[in-house]
Amino acid sequence: MTTVTRSPRRGTAPAEATARAAARRGAGADPRRRAGRRRRVIAVAFVLPALLLLGALVVYPVLFSVGRSLFDASGTRFVGGGNYVEMFRDPATLRAIRNSTIWVVVAPTLLTGLGLVLAVLVEKIRWAAAFKVLLFLPMAVSFLAAGIIFRLAYEEDPDKGVLNAAVVGVHDLVEDGSPYPGARAREGESVRKAPGGAYETAAALSPGAAPVALPLVGVKPQDVPAAARPAAQAASAPAAAGELRGVVYLDFTPGGGGRPGEVDAEESGLPGVAVEAVRDGAAVASATTAADGSFAFTGLEASGGYALRLPEANFAAPYTGVSWLGPALVTPAIIGAYLWIWTGFAMVLIGAGLSALPRDALEAARMDGANEWQIFRRITVPLLAPVLTVVFVTLVINVMKVFDLIYIIAPGPVQQDATVLATQMWLVSFGGGNDQGLGSALGVLLLLLVIPAMVFNVRRFRRSQS
């Protein structure tokens, strides 16, 4: 039997070599692949807690609020866009949108301007670091504490509110107050109340008649001036020919026992009271009482027909200052508190941008003869435009969410006059409205208003990093 031996095919050896090379490459690539997978697993392990936290605290509440806004107050009946329609029909919501617009326009603009001016000025003073720390300190105060501070500062009672104490002090320096605030005349047959708060004698008087006694009450004995003297002698002194006399006195006898409407021996005259002689409804003469409360008019016509009037200015209540937390001023007052807190933040950020400006451009402008205002307007501000934009947009985002200051500073009766979208959302949902459907719709609206500013800031940050 003949054995046939076949020779190996041509090209078999190169094929085996190729397979062996591929096997070696696969064996070398496998550790690299495993290392890459390991790095990805480690990265996911580090990122996963943050993703879970982000989903639990941000994504889920947003999605839940969007879904909840499509249901009624009880959360059982689907109403679609009904809450959004109701939102723009509600006068309180429209007022909140108006106030939010005021906040967005006024607060970031003022803060950016103040921060820019202060940042430029701080560079020119000796103790710049201490000044920055001083202005930045309010940022360390919580909004709750700041709200309580300004609620007390805005108190209308000047004995409690520091702002009104200052306003009243300045007012009293330039304008005299009434001598006996809260006092009133003892009305009777001889004296009656006139329109406007003044008091007049009921009977017509003629020069030369007996002195007229005008009794006042409502004056505390300790408020009677120390220079006041008893009024009994002035009340009994006869009038000269052609003279119309009288006395203004406190109709109160210390210890009791006096007779109402009559000048007793121990009753005091009231100095400094304005008295007018009136004829045909017009004042023809005026006088001020002396230490014993006496006054006299001379040069009057003898034909008579005069009445004596105590003007209402004698009894006007003292000036108590400005109603900072009234309906008209409550929003500007709260914005003022917000400025106090955030001015340091704006100044520090703008100051950081200012320190990075090219000094050669500023020096070149000074050498060319430009003054400091021209350098500020034509060089500093344009070069700081990116920083100013970031500060402004950041403050806009922050202002849209303001809640604490308004809720704490605004008193209950004017809470609706100061409300913004954030406070309105809380009031509708939890502060008595108990309509979480409408409150969720307000929350979605607030989110939609904030998102464009956030996107703008992120894009600008990315461009600055590229």
Image (cartoon, rainbow, N blue to C red):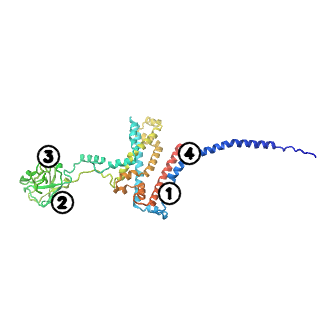
Outermost residue to the front? 1
User: What amino acid type is highlighted by mark number 1?
Assistant: Phe
87 w.r.t. 9: above or below: below
Q: Nearer the viewer, residue 446 or 455?
A: 446
Q: Position of residue 264 (x, y in %)?
A: 9, 53
Report the disc number at residue 64: 1
Q: Residues within 10 Å of mark 2 (few under 14, many from 20)?
A: some
Specify which label sits upstream in the sequence, 3 or 2: 2
The residue where tag 2 is placed is: 194
Specify which label sits upstream in the sequence, 3 or 1: 1
Q: Position of residue 54 (x, y in %)?
A: 52, 50
Q: CA distance from mark 3 to mark 1?
A: 76 Å
User: What amino acid type is highlighted by mark number 3?
Assistant: Ala
Label 2's element?
loop
**Horizontal arrangement in the rendering, residue 43 relative to residue 58 (left or right):** right
Q: CA distance from mark 3 to mark 2?
A: 30 Å
Report the disc number at residue 46: 4
User: What amino acid type is highlighted by mark number 2?
Assistant: Ala
Nearest to viewer (mark 3 / mark 4): 4
Label 4's element?
helix
